[in-house]
Image (tube, rainbow, N blue to C red):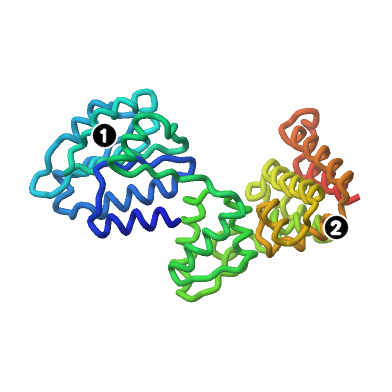
Amino acid sequence: MVEVKQLVTDINNGNIKPVYFLMGEEPYYIDKISEFIENKVLTEDEKGFNQTVVYGRDTTIEEIVGQAKCFPMMSERTVVIVKEAQDLSRTIENLVSYVENPLESTVLVLCYKYKTLDKRKKLIKSIAKKGVVFESKKLYENQVGDWISGILKGKKYQIDPKAIHMLVEFLGTDLSKISNELDKLMLVLPKETVITPKHIEDNIGISKDFNVFELRKAIGKKDILKSNQIINYFAENPKSNPLIMTISLINSYFTQLLMYHGLKDKSKANVARALRVSPYFVDDYVLAGKNYPMRKVSQIINYLREADVKSKGVGASNISHADLLKELLFKILH
């Protein structure tokens, strides 16, 4: 993210603000920025007397203000980091009086995760004048692939599109989880490596041939043999392939197909944009669209809803998850 890079550059150049309010649904960048400030602003020798880290649930606004008003000892600055500041949401506005006249030698960092404050609020307006308000927005699924590529490129790695899709299917859009798995890969693979599905399978444990991505692809092609091979693998490895998650991901696939049928402009660029997928996978949706007309897609979505209810034990307490999946697949493919 450009905003993150600029923030890091400013701090490296000594342009440090007295207040940083880091908020948003995506905790990854909030953690990374607060860690950077925690590690960068003070030396190890200075941290003992001049750096304080507290958690929202264990402190009050009054205590935070008290710590922020302390002058540094044998250092130019004091750093106060408030993690999980969202736990102070009921009283957070009480910071306004401090923020309007902050101690210039203090760097106050507030990590307000999983939610945002109304930017019309006086606190946010005051911080914007004196410091930095950073909003960490959740990435859409189609944006995560570019994010993965960018992270790896910065560390001199590349990645195959299918490998990206495997990671996103398995880990979702949780950037912290994805980052942890990428760190594992980079520990064992030399720089300049092009990360492939085989690397993902060997080092993360996601099967390159038997995963939901491959199941959706096989279903889209109406490849009955391959589809059955994959669900049989799922039946043998239920912990790695829980039925509820499988149904959810197949449902999202057919929801995208329903959207595809509703598009007037079916150019590759528009399909990728509307479905929020990489252009690399658009041809798969075009083929699936031919195999499953809109009426059939609507019918399949109903089958998926029924299977979801049954998977939770409603009206099908004696049917195994493996049999439910086999029944669902038969209905989809026939």
Furthest toward the right, the residue is 334
Q: Residue at x 78, y 57 (%)?
A: 266
Residue 289 at x, y percent in the picture? 83, 55
- In the rendered structure, the answer to whether residue 127 lies left or right of residue 275 reads left
The front one of 242 and 64 is 64
**Residue drawn at (52%, 58%) of the image:** 147
Please state if 328 lies on the left or on the right of 208 as rendered.
right
Q: Residue furthest top?
A: 90
In x, y percent, where is residue 118?
Answer: 44, 32
**Quadrant of the rendered image containing residue 104:** top left
- Quarter of the image that includes the N terminus: bottom left
Where does label 1 land, which residue? 99
Residue 320 picture quarter: top right
- As helix, strand or loop, the secondary structure at mark 2 comes to loop
Q: Is there any visible trace of residue 65 in the rendered image?
A: yes
How many circles with numbers are drawn on the protein?
Answer: 2
| Mark 2 surroundings within 10 Å by alpha-carbon count, few (fewer than 14), some (14 through 19), many (20 or more) | some
What residue is drawn where x is 49% and y is 63%?
Answer: 150
For mark 2, what is the residue? 222
| Mark-to-mark CA distance, 1 and 2 | 61 Å
User: Looking at numbered disc 1 in the image, what kind of residue is underneath it?
Assistant: Val
The x, y position of residue 238, in whole percent, is 68, 47
- First of labels 1, 2 by sequence position: 1
Can residue 229 be spotted in the picture?
A: no
